[in-house]
Image (cartoon, rainbow, N blue to C red):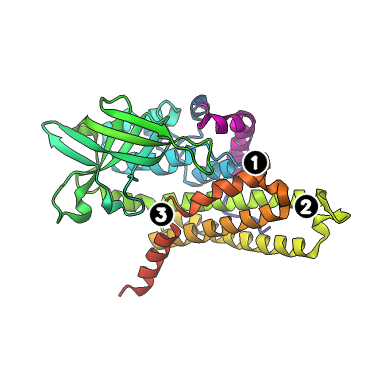
Amino acid sequence: MIPRTIFETEHEQFRESVRKFLEAEAVPYHEQWEEDGQIDRQLWYKAGEQGFLCPTVPEEYGGVGVDYRYNAIVTEEVARLGLTGIGFTLHSDIVVPYILHNGSEAQKRKYLPGCLSGELVTAIAMTEPGTGSDLQGIKTTAELDGDHYVINGAKTFITNGQQADLVIVVCKTNQDSSAGAQAFSLLLVEADTTGFQRGKNLKKIGLKAQDTSELFFQDVRVPKENLLGEEGKGFLYLMQELSQERLSLALAAVSSCEAVLQHTVDYVKERKAFGKPVAAFQNTQFKLAELDAEITAMRVFVDRCLELHIQDKLDAVGASKAKLLSTELQGRVMDECLQLHGGYGYMWEYPVARAFADARVQRIYGGTSEVMKLIVGRSLLAD
């Protein structure tokens, strides 16, 4: 394996702390959380106490103001241990940055301390029953009535949906058909607001310990000061944050690949077929060699994207390439590694089975592989 040079000593010390925390506080309980359909709410408080939530938030709001590499470490360790129920990455890498980058000073001081402590779990409500990657097809409305916006609509596939205390809702604030992307705004909705309801916790192929919900808004009144940023700029804000979201998914994909490959190497050394270890067969060695080479190459590329991101140089096209290539590789790695496990690979108690099921959605959320190809393709053909 090529040594990683992007992390410094203090980053690796942080990684060790995160790994020990997860091994003690999450690994022994994750199977039960899969049965429950969500993680223990107390894990959020414990992670907050350790400083593992939103590490990039500046000190003035209660954070430590470190660089994004610390976020990346949390993402990687959660993925490496197969703890796919834990929604820390969505919270720290995706939702909180909207508040940090676009929120008013009052909003930051009101919400960020709770996001850091784990008292406020966050979610972002984009996807609707009739829309997927086509965010401009969103129909949830927010109409101004005096000093309040009145929200009506429904969202689905919302990560952290059952436990979220604060939801950023993508709404249509301009009903004029000619408004285009400027029709959308972001509103902060607290979970105890009248008219806000959580639907069922959705049953999924994988990510079984992750609460993923339907959300409903019926005449939900939120004060005008809950508008995040400016009205009509919601779509712009979404586009600005998507690069970090897609990088997070790429980081998780590569870490999961590395972990499952190691599980498979360990398994084929022990498992025997036709009187000898499965590892002794040339086909096994060739398959493992191919996967290891591809994962190594992907790690180098994604680390380069991470390096560019902390320098504020990673563009939407680069992030889309990272997300596309890493998640497609993840799918292949899980399939090949499951095959090398034989029938046991299909048994849920084996890490490869869980990883196989969990990996499938990586090519869907955060923008499908097809959308990633569109972004890259259009950049090639642009004048």
- At horizontal 24% and vertical 34% (from top left) the residue drawn is 226
Q: Which residue is mark 3?
A: 367
* Residue 278, percent from left and from top: 80, 55
**The N terminus, quarter of image:** bottom right
Residue 29 falls within the magenta-colored stretch: yes
Q: Give the residue pinned by disc 1.
A: 348
Q: Amino acid at mark 2?
A: Val
Position of residue 8 relative to residue 145, above or below, is below
Residues at marks 1 and 2 touching, judged by CB atoms closer than 8 Å: no
Report the label total.
3
The residue at the far front in this view is 343
Question: Residue 55 at x, y = what percent?
Answer: 46, 38
Mark 3 or 2, nearer chain start:
2
Nearer-N-terminus badge (1/2) = 2
Decide if residue 296 is on the left or right side of residue 88.
Answer: right
Q: Secondary structure at mark 3?
A: loop
Q: CA distance from mark 1 to mark 2?
A: 18 Å
Q: Left of 185 or right of it: where is 369?
A: right
Quarter of image, res 200: top left
Residue at the image position 80 percent from the left and 57 percent from the top: 279
